[in-house]
Image (spheres, coloured by chain):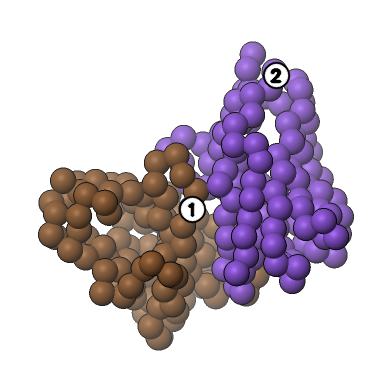
Amino acid sequence: GENVEQHPSTLSVQEGDSAVIKCTYSDSASNYFPWYKQELGKRPQLIIDIRSNVGEKKDQRIAVTLNKTAKHFSLHITETQPEDSAVYFCAAPRANKLTFGTGTQLKVEL
Amino acid sequence: SAVISQKPSRDICQRGTSLTIQCQVDSQVTMMFWYRQQPGQSLTLIATANQGSEATYESGFVIDKFPISRPNLTFSTLTVSNMSPEDSSIYLCSARKEALGEQYFGPGTRLTVT
């Protein structure tokens, strides 16, 4: 089955800096990789996703890159703001089900 | 996208009792799932709710403990049976329209078993 590793578990950055979270997966057949943001007490929210036929996708300050050869994908947040503080989860598919990473607690400090 | 609601939002239950959580999606979806999330932890898949047939359970989860119904393409229920304090957790409903694509979550049900 799919195994998803996520690093780091916690990340603290200064406002305006960039943040990068990395995930690795094990199933070479995986072809869809979403990222979720979960604020305290709230539901996980899909913020960006990428399919295996592209190497990078951007949406304003958020981008995801995919390296299929190395079987890893990363979330990049530029110009971080306090409202970016949350737990971020990556996921990869196993059959038609998503396996989630362990999460990264991002704290953006003023 | 899909808007997902759950009832109840939270409950405090006594051990040995059962609680049924309802999940409603605002549009027809292909797949519905139930997850459990312990505080500070990741999301663990309990089962896939199949419309018109028995749910598909993940390793470590069984139908007698977590019976699931899915009578149509927009609604599902999860029952937590014979509860113990170890069942205290947040239970999340999730759904997506395609076999593999954007997947959305309900707001969760915070269950405390005393």
Question: Residue lying furthest bottom in this view?
Answer: B53
Q: Which chain is brown?
A: B
Provide the secondary structure element on which disc 1 rests: loop
Q: Is residue B104 left or right of residue B35?
A: right
Q: CA distance from mark 1 to mark 2?
A: 28 Å
Q: Report x, y in % for residue B9.
A: 31, 48
Q: Which chain is purple?
A: A
Residue at numbered disc 2 = A15
In the rendered image, residues at marks 1 and 2 fall on the same chain: no
Residue at numbered disc 1 = B43
Residue at x 36%, y 49% (from the top left corner): B90
Residue A33 sits in quarter: bottom right
Residue at x 68%, y 22% (from the top left corner): A13
Few, some or many residues within 10 Å of mark 2 (<14, 14–19, 20+): some
User: Given this view, does label 1 or label 2 mark the residue nearer the observer?
Assistant: 1
Q: Which mark is residue A3?
A: none
As shown in the figure, which amino acid type bears the numbered disc 1? Leu
Few, some or many residues within 10 Å of mark 1 (<14, 14–19, 20+): many
Q: Nearer the viewer, residue B92 or A21?
A: A21
Residue B24 sits in quarter: bottom left
Which chain hosts label 1?
A: B
